[in-house]
Image (tube, grey):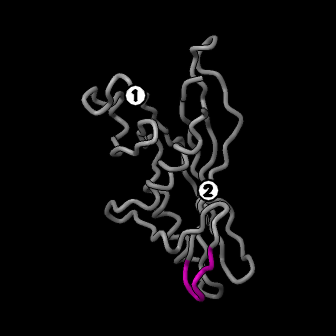
Amino acid sequence: MSGLSEIKTLLISRLTSTSSGASIPSASLALENRSFKPTNDARFYRATVLPARPGDVGFGTPGDNRHMGIFQVDVFEPKNRGDTAATTEAERIITFFKRGTRLIGLDDITVPIYPSETLYPSETLYPEDNYWFSIWIERAYCDIALEVEESYHVPVVIEWNCDRPN
């Protein structure tokens, strides 16, 4: 298994977490292949995980695969309100996915976020019979803003990578 579902879960959990100043309300978040109707005249978001082709990290069958891709969070602000609110919100999201941020998962379990200085998780948190993995955030930035339909759209691009067993 590539782990893409676990990767999506960790990225979206980070986006909607209850950490101070970071939460995006799940009611205003559109996710892939799920019905969503934005509230009239209110900001909403769309989260999309776009995987790239995996690469090899090691040699032979036991070597890990490096999965990488883009986690795009689109901020949609109602039209005719200027660009300041949407841009400020996009910048707030970027600060929550700073370069070097490490999201740690254990099989299908989401565990606490550790600072980038923590290279390996504690053995007490991760029993030997479970495989832990981490997603590294490489960079996050605002892309070109556009006016679409009834909204002003600011995309936030978050580049990530994750090593998983073959």
Q: Main secondary structure of the magenta part?
A: loop
Which residues are the magenta region?
36-43
Q: Earlier in the sequence, mark 2 or mark 1?
A: 2
Q: Is residue 76 above or below residue 66?
A: below
- Residue shown at the point (50%, 63%) measured from the top left: 91
* Identity of the residue furthest to the left in this view: 124
Q: Position of residue 41 (x, y in %)?
A: 58, 88
Compared with residue 101, is residue 130 higher up or lower down, i.e. above or below? above
Q: Amino acid at mark 1?
A: Asn
- Against 70, is 79 above or below? below
Q: Amino acid at mark 2?
A: Gln
- Residue at x 63% of width, y 66% of height: 34
Q: Quadrant of residue 160?
A: top right
Q: Position of residue 66 (x, y in %)?
A: 60, 29
User: Where is mark 2, residue-wise?
Assistant: 72
Name the secondary structure under disc 2.
strand
Residue marked by disc 1: 130
> Residue at 49% of width from left, 39% of height from top?
135
Locate the N terminus and report the quarter of the image it occupies. Answer: top right
